Amino acid sequence: MSENSSVAPEVVPEFGKVRKFLFPVHSFEVKKALPMGMMFFFILFNYTCLRNLKDALVVTAPNSGAEVLPFLKGWLVMPCAVLFTFLYAKGSDAMSCEKLFYVTMGIFIAFFGIFGFVIYPNLNILHPAAKTVAEWQNAHKTWAWPLAAVGNWSFALFYMMAELWGSVALSLLFWQFANQICKTSEAKRFYAFFGLLAQFSLLLAGELADAFAKTESQSKSVFWIIGIVVASGLLVMCIYRWIYVYVLTDKKLYDKPELPGAKKKKTKMGFWQSMKIMVTSPYLGLIAALVICYGISVNLMEGLWKGQAHTIYSDKNQFNAFMGRYSRYTGIVSIFVMIVGGNILRKFSWFTAAVITPVLTLITGSLFFAFVIWKDSFADSLASFADTLTRVLKPEEAIVITPVIAAVLLGEIILILAKSTKYALFDLTKEMAYIPLDEEMKVKGKVVVDVVGGRLGKASGAWIQLGLLTIFSKIWGTKARLIQIAPCLFGIFVVSCIVWTLAVNTLSKKITAVTAQPPATATS
């Protein structure tokens, strides 16, 4: 026997320290990981551009305000999300996943193109006069905000489609595809990289919004933003096709016997069976609880924040530029959080990575609500702080910090932190929870949870706000504002965050149990 035979072989690290931290992908896997990351980049880029523009169009429209948003989310976006889920379930039975992807993306791209190039240039013809809408509102004060949405109907439709883009293209189409072609071992390394690459899209979208806001013509600004969105959507479809042709045919990168969503002889679940699964399956129900509680919590906080911001930025371009800066800063922070979050996901348990978002949202959101509710009591302190800054930084120009300005700034910081941890940890841990499920549940279960559940969360937050606005408008005999119902929203926000945290804990135990067994429908 050799003298050195008892010596253990040297263990070679899988990746170097820097590569393990930033890019834990093998060289042969780049062909798979990079195109997926680019798909995510362009989808999130469109989502950010559309989010900034939809808020600017609706909030600053004639006779409108942030108070219109709850009506749109609760009574327009939510029903359309349910309708989409029904049609998508039917489409998944009739078409392959690849064809369904192209059809779904094509509908969104066509609508955005028609809005930007046909509808928006002809608003004077297509929308009722602002004076007419104001008369409707004066005659029916309780329904003033829904009437504002009716008067600006094309903005309402654009808002609805932009909202659905986030649920459909981002949460459903991309992540469903990723879960189908990635193994759990790959997901732990790839998903954080996808997110990291995609965060740079927030920087690009923010810069574009800021640049286009400086143009004199709002029509030209919308024209160019929509044109870029359409081109970006077409690129996503091209990358998707490239992956099907060159990645899924490579056995080193995809070792399943058939392509994702290939036709099977087994009986397909119908729409109502899929809906029933979400309600009766504890596993999917818990994933839905995470999505719904996130939607309620952030929606309650975000609506109040946008209402405060509208008092400062009343012009469409100004508001779009403001949202663009918000997106840019979100991207910068998200890149850092994504790097840290990816390593948390690899080094610690699923529960540790998943619980950070609800706990952080609860703590920082409570600070925001508390400040907004009692902001006037800080007026003297803020004025004194502004005087000190003026003397130190700009003696020749007075710095003004009103309670509203401080509330908008604080809300922006808190929402950036909440969104960053959502992108870096919430989204990744949620998607990993789908991987143990079978192919049928990955398609049908995911569309119900992410599209209907995601919209239900935002719609629930919207219904809460709309209900309180309607009640107080009727009591006071005038249009109620979100700032006036902030104490009620605060209490509901806290309850939602607590339920969210408890759901994470319970789902963590379910994931541990399911991953120890062969993939199943997780209905028990």
Image (tube, rainbow, N blue to C red):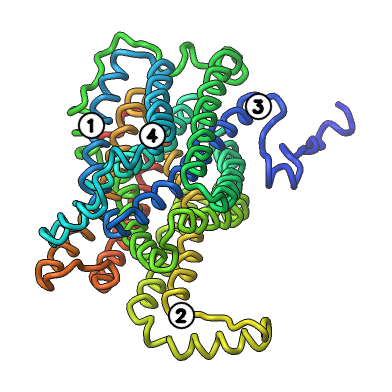
Q: Residues within 10 Å of mark 4 (few under 14, many from 20)?
A: some
Q: Earlier in the sequence, mark 4 or mark 2?
A: 4
Q: Earlier in the sequence, mark 3 or mark 4?
A: 3
What's the CA distance linking mark 3 and mark 1? 38 Å
- Element carrying mark 3: helix
Q: 478 left or right of 311? A: left
Q: Residues within 10 Å of mark 3 (few under 14, many from 20)?
A: some
Q: Nearer the viewer, mark 1 or mark 2?
A: 2
> The N terminus lies in which quarter of the figure?
top right
Q: Which residue is mark 4?
A: 115
Q: Are marks 3 and 4 in contact (CB under 8 Å)?
A: no
What's the CA distance linking mark 4 and mark 1? 21 Å
What's the CA distance linking mark 3 and mark 4? 39 Å
Depth check, front residue: 484 or 418: 484
Q: Earlier in the sequence, mark 4 or mark 1?
A: 1
- Element carrying mark 4: helix
Q: Amino acid at mark 3?
A: Glu
Residue 72: x percent and y percent?
A: 26, 48
Q: Which mark is residue 83?
A: 1
Q: Are marks 2 and 3 in contact (CB under 8 Å)?
A: no
Q: Which residue is mark 2?
A: 402
